[in-house]
Amino acid sequence: MNDFIDAAVEQFARDHTEPESDLHVRLREETYRVMDRPQMQVDAIEGRFLKMLVRVTGACNVLEIGTFTGYSALMMAEGLPDDGRLITCEVDPKAEAIARRYFSESPHGSKITLRMGPALETFKTLSDPLDLVFIDADKANYSNYYEASLPLLKPGGLIIADNVLWSGKVLDPQDADGHAIVAFDRMVQSDPRVENVCLTVRDGMMLARKREQ
Ligand SMILES: C[S@@+](CC[C@H](N)C(=O)[O-])C[C@H]1O[C@@H](n2cnc3c(N)ncnc32)[C@H](O)[C@@H]1O
């Protein structure tokens, strides 16, 4: 659910968004049944927005940092062409097992490669140019993920970061994650390498497009 929009208005928006697939509904239900912090999963609107961003940018090579149970990866994979590829990074084996099961059920799952291990280690093994990066893992490393992504990102490519409003606590951060998010937001805002917009979708999404020059 959106942290900032009236619940009834949010429901109206959901009712006027391409519905989730049955697979996504089942994945959401299982995640809420068995995982400790299911609200980490993106919601249906943000998921559909991620798919739309993949589509409208024409992205073919996508990197996701923070798979969890695979909901956002499956949404973005739906937006990829048949020969598109998505690498997604995770450290939690319980989340991994669920994600792999749903990837294998989806007609888009063959586009997805799940890489286990700290994402900054996985970055060291990547060299192919990226069209789009979705950052949605440990907040302390957001700035590191951003810096690691930019050299791999094609000119005109897009970095998307989730939770950049931290439930509104960016106005008065009280914990380390809140401070990390504010530092990340400031860094992107002052980065001449990108043009950016901070959206109030759900818990806040930062979109940063790498400039051509
Ligand atoms: C907010 S959840 C991701 C939600 C997912 N994008 C979705 O919509 O379902 C963050 C995930 O990042 C993972 N994570 C935390 N630290 C990580 C790291 N250093 N490298 C890779 N993944 C990490 C966590 O285990 C967790 O599953």
Image: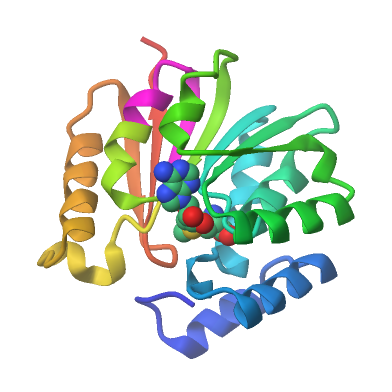
Q: Kindly identify the residue that appears in the image at 47 percent across and 19 percent down.
A: 124
Q: Kindly identify the residue that appears in the image at 13 percent across and 64 percent down.
A: 173
Residue 122 is inside the magenta segment = no
In the rendered structure, the answer to whether residue 66 lies left or right of residue 142 reads right
Residue 17 lies, in percent from the top left, at 67, 68
Number of labels in the image equals 0
In the rendered structure, the answer to whether residue 66 lies left or right of residue 87 reads left
Q: Nearer the viewer, residue 134 or 34?
A: 34
Q: Is residue 136 visible?
A: no
Residue 160 is inside the magenta segment = yes
Residue 84 lies, in percent from the top left, at 76, 29
Q: Is residue 191 visible?
A: yes
Q: Nearer the viewer, residue 39 or 78?
A: 39
Image quadrant in which you'd find residue 170: bottom left
Image quadrant in which you'd find residue 150: top left
Say how the picture is coloured.
rainbow
Q: Kindly identify the residue that appears in the image at 45 percent across and 28 percent down.
A: 121
Vertical position of residue 55 compared to residue 22: above or below: above
Residue 111 lies, in percent from the top left, at 79, 36
Image quarter in which the C terminus is found? top left
Which region of the structure is painted magenta?
A: 146-161
Residue 46 lies, in percent from the top left, at 55, 61
Vertical position of residue 188 compared to residue 152: above or below: below
Q: Nearer the viewer, residue 123 or 10?
A: 123
Vertical position of residue 148 compared to residue 15: above or below: above
Q: Kindly identify the residue that appears in the image at 85 percent across and 51 percent down.
A: 104
Point out the residue furthest to the top here: 213
